[in-house]
Amino acid sequence: MADEMVLRAQRFINLTYMDGATLGIPKLEENGRTGWVVMYALTRALQYEMGITALSNSFGPTTLSTIQTKYGEIDDTRLPSANFGKIIQSALYCKGYDGGDIDGTYNSRVHNAVIKLKDDMGLGETYPNSSLQPKVIKGLFNMDAYVTVNYGLDKIRAIQRWLNSRYIHRKDFYVIPCDGHHSRDVAKSMLFAIQYELGMADGVANGAFGPGTQAGLKARTVSVGSSGVWVQLFTAAMVLNGRMAPFTDVFDAGFEATVRSFQNFSQVTQTGAGDFPTWASLLVSYGDQTRSGAACDGVTKITPARAAALKAAGYEVIGRYLYNASTTSLPEKEIQPGELDTIKAAGLRCFPIYQTWARSVDYYSPAQGVTDCRMAVHKAQEHGFKTRSRIYFAVDYDAMDDEVTSYILPYFQSIRREMDRLGDPYDIGVYGPRNVCSRVSGKGYSDASFVSDMSSGFSGNLGYPLPADWAFDQIVTKTIGSGDGRIEIDNNLASRRDRGQSDFHATGGERLDVAFDPAHLALMGMEVENYMAEIGKPGGVGRVYTVRECFDEIMRYDDTITAAARTFRMRKALIQTSAFWERCHYSLKDQVEDAGVIEYHTGIVPDWAKDLPVVEKFVDSSTGIAKISGRTGILSRNWAILAGMLQGDLLGHLRDEDRWAMWQRLYGDPVFNLTTVAYLHMWGAAGKAGDVAEPPMRLPALDYTLDETRTVLRRYQGTPDSVAVEHAQLRMPLYAIFERYNALIRNR
């Protein structure tokens, strides 16, 4: 929303500095909206009025020292010029304070505004007058807020104002925001405060978590009964890390329980005291780097000797990369042949990481999300990771918050959608700074975080708490073992949210199916059409689609079918055959039944069914591209959930609302429907639990025999005493056509 006084401030800059391009003061858009562009122009104008020749957007040391040496403080008796006063008035308006008329006078309205500004900063008692001190002026010329904004917390604002009031006289401490939000500036100010209380002199205190600060904190443990400034700093750090703690100078028994809860969450020994490991976890993202983690990750092949060294060092789970996009660097970055067998044999576990470049914002886009999801799924299947393994997609750079909004979230949303399209074979994790992890998981695009806390200077780590869903916390690089067992790793804490995988599909031997080559599409389609004509199928009248239309529709979803076949180690021809056969047999009768299901559950006949024969009401029907009923969809997917192949809630196959919910997805979502074909085949092989039971057989496999294929095709359609036996026999040559072309492509 435009503000009249901000508009006047913009006009003042443009009119006063009409030769701004030459001076280095750019012309402003006169829109009445404050922002950094306006603040930069005001900063440059202030520098110009003070005689600084090299103008800059930054209110840096030169600008500050010039004010200090030339004027000391600014008030109605020490106002350098009318333009200087107008700049101050304009800045007050841009910060939301009443600067009076922009007339260059330090009038009563300016007095009152300055008093209010300093009180909001927490400096009302430190500077109890209406003068503008140099550091206050510096705090005026930025976009920091000094009142709570965007649901800021009063408790955090109290800490911010306390820090300002206590340390503003120290040389390198500047006014921090008082907006009720933790941030990079607030985190840095806490380290300065720690160093000042340790007795470090100006120029020595630097806001870094160095050896001197660490040594000092090791002698500053606070516990039940402690009081004073060190308790204030410790409770402040707890609040800033999202703990429901009081900001106080007294450490009582109730607070001890809160400390233990934080220590448990952060993988710090539960002492209940503010000891060094706890201080470290509160102040810097990597915490106490001497902690030994149960997890690690690296770019080096795990050999038997290295596995033994890791096991001896207490590691339980290893993060390894699914793919290496480079053909020259880090030759062992991607999981090597036989490596997962070595990890399993050593009693270790593995979690997969996917990263190609991922080191700058321009990498991330929805299109890249689709590409990365497909490649990650392909490589995970190739390496033998079973369904429900979690793949961590990387954000390996310091993503600013606006970049997370504009680039990272759309990228992960695309991964989530594509994973759904592929049948949801793997869970999604995120690797990156704290803010990235929290925001991605907050949108529901991931369900576990691998946090790059070793990069403590990242803006996405400094000032953000450890994500609630953290699984692995990367804190330091170290070398383990010696001789052949020597290996460099990143040491990670493990929350046990993700224990990694301990069992893998065998690799090699029979190859997994791959995406279909469109060059063969016309020839395969012709063979399929000729065969269906030869056997007179689907036959009869009232069929809705031609054979060619059915074939083309099935092949449009080749990515979904390929992903499902690869995930469950079955031949994609099995899914293609069942789905194509059912689609060919979709009739006007099926349309009537589908319309009847909709009318039964909604009371409305859909528009597309108005010209059909009289529509009877049906509770359920075989619907969608592969003609699957809500009942069988529920039974097959329940089986997959119980078998650990699928996540979700168990539904009641006799419960109307559950059948209706399942039916709607099968009816309206071809990807969901085709993925369910794979579950139906596995459920059928397992004996159709909850339905007409048959003896279990082994689940569909890459080396299924013709008899096994025929049996599972029949079980998809019906019992041994039904027409399904005849149809299974007729479908075998169809299966052979699909499989012949699939084999030609996968074995090239």
Image (spheres, rainbow, N blue to C red):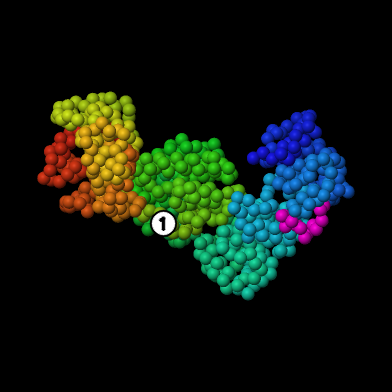
- Residue at numbered disc 1: 499
Q: In the image, which residues are magenta?
A: 119-134
Q: Quadrant of residue 123?
A: bottom right
Q: Residue furthest right?
A: 77
> Residue 742: x, y in percent?
27, 34
Secondary element under disc 1, as helix, strand or loop, is loop
> Residue 29: x, y in percent?
69, 33
Q: Main secondary structure of the magenta part?
A: loop
Picture residue at 38% right of the left edge, 53% below the top: 501
Picture residue at 57% right of the left edge, 59% below the top: 242
Picture residue at 24% right of the left edge, 29% below the top: 545
Quadrant of the rendering where the N terminus is positioned: top right
Q: Is residue 124 magenta?
A: yes
Q: Is residue 208 magenta?
A: no
Question: Which one is in front, 700 or 555?
Answer: 555
The answer to whether 61 appears left or right of 645 in the picture is right
Q: Residues within 10 Å of mark 1 (few under 14, many from 20)?
A: many
